[in-house]
């Protein structure tokens, strides 16, 4: 799979007026604002999410319906500030591989 960083995604978020409120830097904003901007600018919607073992950081993957673009966003649980971690092209969902059997027969 080919991956290229999309700087326009970060640049588009830098134009957000809400970014001035986020002290984390130009790639961070309130989560709801990031969701709206990714939907409006790239037609991206959440396609996967995970939370760390401490329950303090949520990882959300966004992708366009055709897989043309994707964005990885980290979200702090404490204040819902979201920061773009990465972005690129050619998103592809893959099914998990089946576990290899050990040859032990079970009922």
Image (cartoon, grey):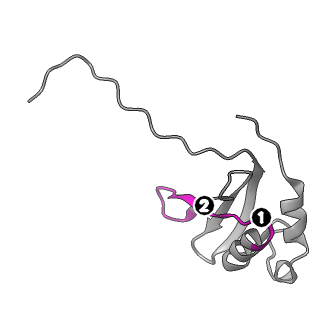
Say which residue appears at 75% left-offset and 52% top-offset.
Answer: 86
Pinpoint residue 15: horizontal percent, then vertical percent.
91, 75
Q: Which residue is more in the foreground, 54 or 41?
A: 41
Range of residues picked out in magenta: 40-57
Q: Which residue in the protein does label 1 denote?
A: 42
Q: Quadrant of the N terminus?
A: top right
Q: Quadrant of residue 107?
A: top left
Say which residue appears at 12% left-offset and 26% top-offset.
Answer: 106
Q: Is residue 7 left or right of residue 44?
A: right
Pinpoint residue 92: horizontal percent, then vertical percent.
62, 44
Query: Seen from this angle, which residue lies furthest left?
Result: 107
Q: Quadrant of residue 25?
A: bottom right
Q: Which residue is more in the foreground, 69 or 101?
A: 69
| Circle 1: element type | helix
Going from the N terminus, do you reach mark 2 or mark 1 first? 1
Q: Which residue in the protein does label 2 denote?
A: 60
| 75 magenta-colored | no
Mark number, residue 3? none
């Amino acid at each position: 799979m080919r991956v290229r960083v999309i700087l326009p995604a970060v640049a588009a978020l830098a134009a957000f007026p809400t970014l001035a409120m986020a002290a984390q830097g130009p790639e961070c904003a309130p989560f709801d604002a990031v969701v709206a901007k990714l939907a409006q600018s790239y037609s991206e919607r959440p396609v996967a999410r995970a939370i760390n073992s401490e329950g303090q950081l949520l990882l959300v993957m966004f992708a366009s319906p055709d897989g043309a673009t994707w964005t990885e966003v980290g979200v702090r649980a404490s204040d819902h500030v979201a920061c773009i971690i990465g972005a690129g092209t050619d998103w592809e969902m893959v099914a998990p591989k089946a576990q290899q059997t050990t040859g032990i027969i079970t009922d």
